[in-house]
């Protein structure tokens, strides 16, 4: 008899595994160009630095303070803690969904001591109206997943968990990008502040020279007023720059999970901007879609919604439940485990919602509509990812071209201002020429510092668009097995 049970169980398991209703998921086919339209505009120098999705790109800037800030943010940033908690929750729900595939086993025990009233049992003595009962048992219930309702549910939850992992990766890429961008902006603002302060010092020297010439009777009040007005205009730039520097310090502190004032002393000493990479190779659109965690998350959610069509479709078919009980029952605790006290029960339950077919069909239609929306959301995410990268390529390349011109302008304007001062002191030029040269120098140097900041941040933005900067410990996206395209609800297979 025992030998006959094994083939029967094998046949039952095979029958259960062979029949899963609803559409199977297949990865959508996305039409992408062979290369980015703007890929050539990023080719500025001869050296190629390909972007790798698992590269810690910020270390390529060779700035220990930036690397420390990024490492701290990956450890303590509160948005990442929220994303990690969401991933842990999805993982726990997946473990719970998997347990639905197994029998549910519970244990129970009961002891009662009651007495019926004389009215309930007339003519029965007081002692005979007493009733005691003791029982203990182990219960098991198991839904026989003939039509794949539970398997589809596990499939959907697994895809949701993978989407949460991709969300966590996307949050990490976003935080790394934000830390790098804010840090570069801070160093750029500090450079612009240094330029303004340096030019103010030069203009103050010019004003002192004009005052000395005025005292000697060689210049007029008009010259003194013009020189002082230019100095005050330059000094007026400084408070706004100082405020922006403070804002970025506060932002960086919050990004690393600390109070806004925590990094002021550490970040106040000025440092030069991180160096620009020689050249960035953005790869191909196909590589982009494999690297972007937001695209992966959208695809996993499409998978989950497709699987839930099968969960809803399973309600068109009977739901079978196998239950069993093994226990013991007696009127005396001492007899509870004697031979004749055992009890047992085996039951097969059938639940079929065919009489509620309207609601079932409505749930199937709602699930299919949700899957359609997720497909559209996935396709939109792909397009936005491509747009983001194309924009990042243009932004980076144009900022580099602007940076080259403004670097030469800043150098030449400094030479011109110095020569104008020499000519003025020698009496070969008027004060207007000096003031104009100093104003041009300030504007050119400030514009160069701003352009260099935008160029470096353009590189950061391109790394971010290509999902560069995934730390090695990030839950990576998992490739989804493909079978058939999402379609209308299918019958049992």
Image (spheres, grey):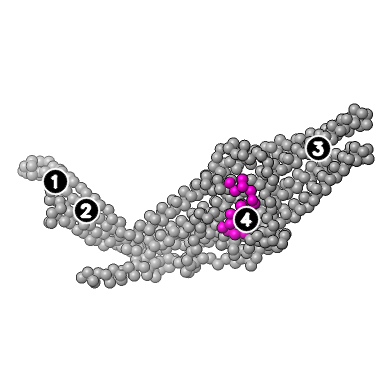
The percent position of residue 71, horizontal first and vertical second, equals 56, 48
The number of callouts visible is 4
- CB under 8 Å between discs 2 and 3: no
- CB under 8 Å between discs 4 and 2: no
Between disc 1 and disc 3, the foreground one is 3
Residue 52 sits in which quadrant?
Answer: bottom right
- The span shown in magenta is 51-68
- CB under 8 Å between discs 3 and 4: no
Q: Mark 3 points at which residue?
A: 202
Can residue 307 be found in the magenta stretch? no
Q: Under tag 2, what secondary structure?
A: strand
Q: Which residue lies furthest to the top in this view?
A: 215
Q: How crowded is mark 1: few (under 14 residues within 10 Å), some or many (20 or more)?
A: few
Between disc 4 and disc 1, the foreground one is 4
Q: In this view, does 400 lie above or below 122?
A: below
Q: Earlier in the sequence, mark 2 or mark 1?
A: 1
Q: Under tag 4, what secondary structure?
A: helix
* Residue 463: image tag: 4
- CB under 8 Å between discs 4 and 1: no
* Residue 137: image tag: 2
The percent position of residue 96, horizontal first and vertical second, equals 38, 55
Q: Earlier in the sequence, mark 4 or mark 2?
A: 2
* Residue 132: image tag: 1
The percent position of residue 262, horizontal first and vertical second, equals 58, 37
């Amino acid at each position: 008899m025992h030998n006959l049970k094994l083939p029967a169980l094998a046949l039952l398991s095979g029958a259960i595994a062979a029949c899963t209703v609803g559409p199977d998921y297949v990865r959508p086919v996305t039409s992408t160009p062979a290369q980015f339209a703007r890929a050539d505009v990023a080719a500025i120098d001869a050296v190629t630095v390909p972007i790798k999705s698992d590269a810690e790109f910020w270390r390529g800037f060779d700035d220990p303070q930036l690397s420390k800030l990024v490492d701290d943010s990956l450890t303590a940033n509160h948005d990442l803690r929220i994303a990690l908690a969401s991933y842990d929750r999805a993982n726990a729900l997946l473990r719970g969904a998997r347990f639905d595939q197994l029998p549910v086993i519970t244990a129970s025990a009961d002891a009662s001591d009651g007495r019926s009233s004389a009215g309930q049992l007339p003519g029965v003595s007081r002692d005979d109206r007493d009733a005691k009962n003791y029982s203990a048992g182990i219960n098991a219930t198991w839904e026989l997943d003939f039509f794949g309702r539970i398997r589809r549910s596990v499939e959907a939850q697994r895809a949701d968990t993978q989407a949460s992992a991709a969300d966590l990766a996307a949050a990490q890429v976003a935080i790394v990008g934000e830390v790098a961008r804010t840090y570069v902006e801070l160093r750029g603002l500090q450079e612009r502040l240094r330029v303004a302060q340096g030019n103010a010092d030069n203009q103050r020297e010019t004003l002192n020279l004009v005052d000395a010439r005025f005292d000697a009777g060689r210049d007029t009040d008009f010259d003194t007023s013009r020189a002082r007005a230019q100095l005050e205009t330059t000094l007026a730039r400084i408070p706004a720059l100082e405020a922006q520097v403070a804002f970025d310090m506060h932002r960086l502190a919050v990004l690393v999970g600390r109070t806004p004032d925590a990094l002021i002393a550490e970040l106040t000493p000025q440092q030069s901007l991180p160096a620009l990479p020689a050249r960035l190779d953005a790869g191909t659109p196909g590589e982009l879609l494999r690297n972007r965690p937001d695209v992966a998350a959208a695809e996993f959610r499409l998978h989950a919604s497709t699987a839930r069509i099968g969960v809803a479709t399973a309600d068109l078919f009977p739901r079978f439940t196998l239950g069993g009980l093994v226990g013991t029952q007696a009127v005396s605790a001492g007899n509870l485990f004697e031979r004749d006290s055992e009890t047992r029960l085996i039951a097969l339950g059938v639940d079929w919602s065919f009489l509620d077919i309207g609601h079932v069909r409505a749930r199937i239609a709602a699930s299919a509509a949700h899957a359609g929306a997720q497909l559209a959301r996935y396709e939109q995410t792909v397009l936005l990812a491509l747009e983001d990268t194309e924009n990042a390529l243009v932004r980076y390349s144009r900022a580099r071209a602007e940076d080259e011109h403004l670097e030469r302008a800043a150098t030449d304007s400094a030479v011109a201002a110095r020569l104008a001062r020499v000519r003025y002191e020698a009496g070969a030029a008027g004060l207007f020429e000096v003031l104009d040269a100093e104003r041009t120098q300030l504007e050119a140097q400030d514009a160069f510092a701003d352009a260099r900041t935008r160029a470096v941040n353009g590189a950061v933005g391109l790394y971010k668009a290509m999902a560069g900067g995934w730390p090695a410990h990030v839950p990576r996206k998992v490739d989804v097995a493909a079978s058939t395209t999402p379609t209308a609800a299918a019958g049992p297979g």
